[in-house]
Amino acid sequence: MEWDWAFVREILPTLLDGVRLTILATILGSLVAAVVGLGFALARRSRNRIFAKGIGFFAEFIRGTPLLVQLYFLFYILPDLGLTLPPLVAGVIGLGLHYGTYTAEVYRSGIENVPRGQWEAAKACNLTVVQTWRHVILPQAIPPMIPALANYFIAMFKETPLLSAITVLELMNQARSVANYNYRYLEPMTLVGVFFLVISLISVIGLRALERRFGRLR
Amino acid sequence: MAIRTSRAIFGTAVAAFVAGGLLLGASGPAAAQERLDELREQGFVRIAIANEPPYTAVNPDGTVSGAGPELARAIFKKLGVEDVVASVSEYGAMIPGLQAGRFDVVTAGLFMKPERCRAVAYSEPDLCDAEAFAVQKGNPFGLRSYEDIAANPEVKIGAPGGGTEERLALEAGVPRDRVIVVPDGQSGIKMLQDGRIQVYSLPVLSINDLLAKANDPNLEIVAPVVGAPIYCAGAAFALGNEELRDAYDAVLAEMKESGEFAEIIEPYGFSAEAAKQVTREQLCAAN
């Protein structure tokens, strides 16, 4: 087993393509997760008990099943129902839905942490429901959530290799096909590890900054 | 008493030293015989397979069949190794796995190509086949060769990761993003049915097997692929294990002579004659 720098130089451009797709999938997945999570959180607070329960059950169902199974479902089974998604879209929806159920809990705790008095004050000022949410509740609820959300962002980033199961050519898949072609695993897999580590470390630094900015109790 | 003890310690030290020396020197001519003895003693040999009938197949009850494993089982039985233990692996992972000592031999129908010949010690040829495409009925894109795929930017080809077909497609100039790595045969057929890929490439017998199982009137086979020669596979051993390979070859040659070879592989659709007409040397030197 010898480390071969020439081989590293040769495969680096291919792997960088994979890195690009990995980052793209993570960012798109996070956006979906952020929106879906908010949707779940609000729906579960709905006055319509049956609706809230239904959504709650659905979220619980997604959280309780493996992401890989969901990806297979989105990619291989949905086409039978007439919906053929491109691999990356299926992957982003899978990641977004799965992590949306986690971020929903973050939103829920954030919203519930807004003191009751704020709701009552909003009512006393005769604000509408939309005004209450937009100007009173969400501005107070969202900042403390940001570090927790960013944490899930990093976790999702590290789950993207699962997308290789549905033929997305992200970093892991690129590395595998490089390894398959050249019968060498040492360099490609080491580089995958290095890329993930570097990006994670940078993200963690960003996360710390977010925590300093938003994480403090006012 | 004291003397005896120290002698015992000395004896142990010598034994350990000798044993260590044997292990270190295990690349000499004695090694293969030793390796074979080890295999005989443990009673099984570890093989790598891919679950691609009729080359290799994992039955619903978990047992392993297919032409490759059946042949290996028969040959190792004659060498005194009672059983084979199979692990399912990706094609691309087989050679690194062999080098890392995860299996003793790959019997997955790994076609001989010069670059593979440099990476492993092949037995003489055993399973020969041409390449084929599975396509939508009527072959709407008119695909006859890997070059046809390269020339049409709308066509995506599915192939097993690290398999010969992936390499042939890439060598023919199909860009990486149009060569979709498909995990297994069923997924390949499914992706073809769903229109995610326009062509799925495997050897003729594998495509025939898959299409027979899928039983889908909207799919058809294009065979043989123009410009892709007939390939032959062999059992692949790790470099340095040539003596074990030679022992395997000796039995294989006998079985080819006696007709036993044909009895094992022909029910799976392979031609024994095709394998007899070529040698490892020819195939490893080709192109």
Image (tube, rainbow, N blue to C red):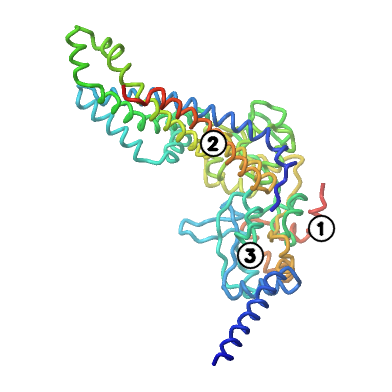
User: Which subunit holds the residue at mark 3?
Assistant: B
**Which comes sooner in the sequence, label 1 or label 2?**
2
State the image coordinates of residue B131 (x, y, percent, origin top left). Answer: 69, 45
- Badge number at residue B72: 3
- Badge number at residue B191: 2
Residue in view at x 19 percent, y 7 percent: A125
Q: Amino acid at mark 3?
A: Ala
Residue count near mark 3 (Cα–Cα under 10 Å), binned few <14, some 14–19, many ≥20: many
Residue B160 in sight from this viewpoint: no
- Residue B16, compared with residue B232, is above or below; it is below
> Mark 2 falls on what kind of element?
helix
State the image coordinates of residue A179 (x, y, percent, origin top left). Answer: 65, 44
Rounded to the nearest angstrom, the CA distance separating label 3 from label 1 is: 21 Å
**Which comes sooner in the sequence, label 3 or label 1?**
3
State the image coordinates of residue B188 (x, y, percent, origin top left). Answer: 56, 40
Whether labels 1 and 2 belong to a single chain: the reply is yes
Q: Nearer the viewer, residue B13 or B153?
A: B13
Residue count near mark 2 (Cα–Cα under 10 Å), binned few <14, some 14–19, many ≥20: many
Residue denoted by label 1: B281
- Residue B215, compared with residue B89, is above or below; it is above
Residue B237: name its quadrant.
bottom right
Rounded to the nearest angstrom, the CA distance separating label 1 from label 2 is: 38 Å
Q: Outermost residue, top direction?
A: A126
> Mark 1 falls on what kind of element?
helix
Q: Nearer the viewer, residue A67 or A30?
A: A30
- Badge number at residue A30: none
Q: Nearer the viewer, residue A118 or B211?
A: A118
| Contact flag, marks 3 and 1 (Cβ < 8 Å) | no
User: Which subunit holds the residue at mark 1?
Assistant: B
